[in-house]
């Protein structure tokens, strides 16, 4: 006889009495999945509205308010704020049509194309900084790179020169350097070798007349 007057669970294979239902029913699972999807959708909508990829405002409290659920519900489904953000990121990857786990080098160009097309649907901040000094530096650097490419490929169109110059500019940016030394944990010498290697490949393409398609 169970203590406290609690009913014993029915033996294996025995049906529940009429009027009683199992806690883990298909209906409950469907409701739980819909709730989870609503939470992820709320987080995704918030990210789409951010002016940058700064996710500091993507908090459990903010997402709960937008999804109209209790904060405890989010913790029950995702465990933590990190778990919630991971779920939102996976949803964004699905929206972009990107499967990182099956990435192949020969398809990388197509992947980047899909990623850039997807990122274009997000609002932009208009540039890394509003400081006129840095804006002027960006313009001088852009003009210098275009001129350098044009001098080496005098039969290229201005559009082709700009595309090649843009590729070179990627390795002249602070974010690229910071990513190499933080995400990839390279030292300064290794980061310089990587950048120099890619720049040499681009220079060789310019020299051989292989412009951006």
Image: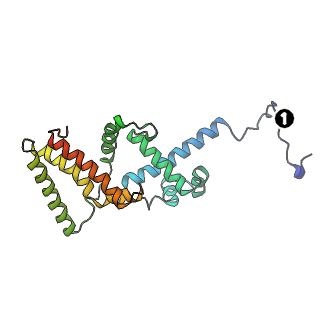
Residue ID at (28%, 61%): 128
In the visual, does 7 lie left or right of 177?
right
Does any portion of residue 134 appear in the rendered image? yes
Residue ID at (29%, 47%): 120
Q: Residues within 10 Å of mark 1 (few under 14, many from 20)?
A: few
Quarter of the image containing the C terminus? top left
Expressed as whole percent of the image width and height from the top left, the position of residue 201 reads 24, 45
In the visual, does 148 lie left or right of 38?
left
Does any portion of residue 54 appear in the rendered image? no
* Mark count: 1
State the residue in front, 165 or 51: 165
Extreme residue in the left direction: 154
Q: Is residue 104 above or below residue 198?
A: above
In the visual, does 67 lie left or right of 129?
right
Expressed as whole percent of the image width and height from the top left, the position of residue 68 reads 52, 53
Quarter of the image containing the N terminus? top right
Place residue 169 in its image quadrant: bottom left
Residue ID at (71%, 41%): 23
- Determine which residue is flagged by label 1: 11
In the visual, does 93 lie left or right of 164?
right
Q: Provide the secondary structure element on which disc 1 rests.
A: loop
State the residue in front, 135 or 44: 135
State the residue in front, 196 or 95: 196
Expressed as whole percent of the image width and height from the top left, the position of residue 50 reads 37, 57
Residue ID at (73%, 38%): 22
Expressed as whole percent of the image width and height from the top left, the position of residue 167 reads 23, 49
């Amino acid at each position: 006889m169970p203590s406290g007057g609690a009913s014993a669970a029915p033996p294996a294979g025995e049906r529940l009495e009429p009027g009683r239902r199992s806690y883990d029913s298909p209906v409950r699972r469907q409701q739980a999945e819909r709730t989870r999807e609503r939470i992820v959708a709320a987080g995704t909508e918030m990210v789409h509205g951010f002016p940058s990829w700064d996710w500091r405002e993507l908090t459990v409290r903010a997402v709960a308010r937008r999804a109209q659920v209790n904060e405890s519900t989010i913790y029950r489904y995702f465990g933590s704020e990190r778990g919630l953000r991971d779920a939102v990121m996976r949803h964004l990857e699905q929206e972009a049509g990107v499967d990182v786990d099956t990435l192949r080098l020969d398809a990388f160009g197509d992947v980047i194309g899909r990623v850039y097309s997807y990122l274009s649907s997000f609002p932009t901040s208009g540039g890394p900084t509003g400081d006129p000094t840095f804006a002027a530096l960006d313009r001088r650097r852009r003009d210098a790179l275009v001129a350098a490419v044009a001098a080496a490929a005098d039969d290229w169109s201005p559009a082709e020169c700009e595309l090649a110059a843009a590729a070179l500019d990627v390795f002249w940016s602070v974010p690229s350097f910071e990513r190499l030394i933080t995400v990839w944990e390279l030292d300064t010498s290794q980061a310089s070798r990587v950048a120099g290697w890619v720049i040499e490949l681009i220079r060789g393409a310019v020299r051989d007349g292989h412009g951006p398609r």
